[in-house]
């Protein structure tokens, strides 16, 4: 793709994003601006439901909603039957954990940059079911320490390895293929949190070899809030039994209350769902499928480098970057300043960033006594001009504070 073609594509993507001309949105690791295609899909469904009724609208939009599975499979590199819809990534994470054949004494290894919500599910399982938890160190680069992971897998009987593809507070991209190979050699299942990577970094599950993966709609995928999904390899899914199945996935077979799982639907879904969110998430996956994943990664990482270059010279700013391969998430501190106040002041100037507190990665951040950072997360529709406005807003905020 030539430079002219790249510039044209970026402008097209911005034209298709109504919010891009109204705000400098650098909180894509929190919730991206949706493209018009996603907005149109949701509004069309809501309008139809208001005119003909909810069940009837769901029937009419069923084929559009089912694109969630076909395009989800396309962007992840798996079969449509291996994809499922959930209310959020946290919902998907818990459903998979509680459905896997884990028991008292089962050992789950996890990376120290794990998201707080995911870690709470593990600790809940430890308290409820007697799971054993084993943290995996991070290397100095910020990525999972593969040598420590290999030792843990070799020395103990690990049943599940639960890891972050890209942690929410650093943007480091962990090497899924190498990690999955180590786990497979130890006959250990692998569950991956891809909330920050789907729509951000290329994923090909045919090559990576992981057993399960979760994702969210609202982040780099650019879909609706309140939507998420999962991938479960077909042979793994065949053995899972959801905790609290409903009539979407199971049916009562006799008056003695016998029941059985259905084989024709994703096993961890629920019957009730937001249909506007469902069709919106399908539209977001379809939109993503039309873009080249390698181009997205190159575009986002180049913008992140611009962010680092723009913030580092500003007196009073401490940018934190790791030496591992990093994507579009950049965090920085303003020592002596109230970071939530700084976030709000930047927002008032039309620049959206996020305060990333310790619950984004409790073990890593609490161990380092980190109070949190301001998090900038760029997407492909952001521009160099957006980065310049960010730097100017940060500098203005600091100058106002010193007056």
Image (spheres, rainbow, N blue to C red):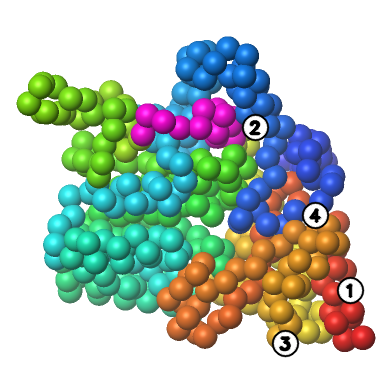
Picture residue at 43% right of the left edge, 76% below the top: 363
Between 270 and 361, the one nearer to me in the picture: 270
Task: From the top left corner, tell me how far across and down residue 192 is, in percent.
Answer: 39, 54
Mark 1–mark 2 Cα distance, whole angstroms, equals 35 Å
Q: Earlier in the sequence, mark 2 or mark 4?
A: 4
Mark 3–mark 2 Cα distance, whole angstroms, equals 41 Å
Residue named by callout 3 = 336
- State the quadrant of the C terminus: bottom right
The quadrant holding residue 26 is: bottom right
Considering only vertical position in the picture, is 148 above or below 22? Answer: below
Mark 3–mark 1 Cα distance, whole angstroms, equals 16 Å
Dot 2 and dot 4 residues touching (CB under 8 Å): no
Mark 2–mark 4 Cα distance, whole angstroms, equals 20 Å
Q: Earlier in the sequence, mark 1 or mark 4?
A: 4
Task: From the top left corner, tell me how far across and down residue 41 is, in percent.
Answer: 63, 26
The quadrant holding residue 231 is: top left
**Mark toward the viewer: 3 or 4:** 3
Task: From the top left corner, tell me how far across and down residue 75 is, in percent.
Answer: 50, 37
Q: Earlier in the sequence, mark 3 or mark 2?
A: 2
- State the quadrant of the N terminus: top right
Q: Which residues are magenta?
A: 270-286
Residue named by callout 1 = 396
Q: Residue furthest right?
A: 403
Q: Earlier in the sequence, mark 3 or mark 1?
A: 3
Picture residue at 84% right of the left edge, 47% below the top: 22
Looking at the image, residue 401 sits to the left or right of residue 374; the answer is right
Q: Give the SS element for disc 4.
A: strand
Residue named by callout 2 = 38
Task: From the top left corner, tell me how far across and down residue 232 is, in percent.
Answer: 32, 41
Residue 281 magenta: yes
- Mark carried by residue 24: 4
């Amino acid at each position: 793709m030539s430079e002219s073609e790249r510039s044209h594509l970026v402008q097209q993507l911005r034209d298709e994003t109504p919010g891009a001309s109204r705000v400098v949105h650098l909180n894509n690791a929190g919730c991206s601006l949706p493209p018009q295609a996603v907005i149109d899909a949701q509004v069309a469904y809501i309008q139809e439901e208001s005119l003909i009724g909810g069940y009837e609208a769901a029937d009419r939009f069923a084929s559009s909603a089912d694109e969630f599975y076909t395009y989800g499979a396309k962007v992840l590199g798996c079969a449509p039957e291996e994809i499922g819809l959930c209310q959020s990534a946290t919902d998907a994470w818990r459903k998979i954990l509680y459905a896997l054949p884990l028991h008292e004494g089962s050992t789950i290894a996890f990376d120290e940059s794990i998201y707080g919500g995911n870690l709470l599910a593990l600790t809940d399982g430890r308290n409820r079911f007697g799971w054993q938890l084993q943290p995996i160190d991070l290397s100095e680069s910020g990525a999972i320490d593969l040598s420590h992971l290999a030792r843990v897998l070799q020395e103990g009987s690990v049943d599940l390895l639960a890891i972050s593809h890209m942690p929410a507070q650093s943007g480091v991209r962990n090497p899924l293929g190498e990690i999955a190979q180590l786990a497979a050699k130890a006959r250990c299942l692998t569950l991956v949190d891809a909330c920050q990577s789907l729509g951000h970094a290329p994923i090909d599950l045919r090559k990576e070899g992981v057993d399960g993966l979760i994702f969210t709609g609202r982040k780099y995928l650019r879909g609706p809030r309140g939507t998420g999904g999962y991938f479960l390899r077909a042979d793994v899914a065949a053995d899972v039994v959801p905790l609290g199945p409903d009539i979407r996935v199971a049916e009562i077979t006799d008056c003695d209350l016998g029941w059985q799982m259905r084989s024709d639907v994703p096993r961890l879904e629920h019957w009730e769902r937001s249909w506007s969110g469902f069709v919106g998430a399908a539209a977001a996956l379809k939109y993503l499928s039309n873009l080249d994943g390698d181009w997205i990664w190159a575009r986002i990482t180049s913008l992140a480098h611009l962010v680092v270059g723009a913030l580092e010279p500003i007196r009073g700013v401490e940018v934190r970057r790791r030496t591992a391969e990093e994507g579009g998430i950049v965090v920085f501190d303003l020592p002596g300043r109230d970071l939530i106040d700084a976030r709000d002041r930047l927002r008032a100037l039309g620049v959206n960033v996020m305060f990333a507190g310790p619950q984004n990665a409790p073990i890593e951040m609490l161990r380092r006594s980190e109070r949190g950072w301001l998090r900038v997360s760029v997407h492909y529709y952001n521009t160099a001009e957006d980065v310049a406005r960010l730097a100017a807003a940060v500098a203005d905020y600091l100058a106002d504070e010193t007056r």
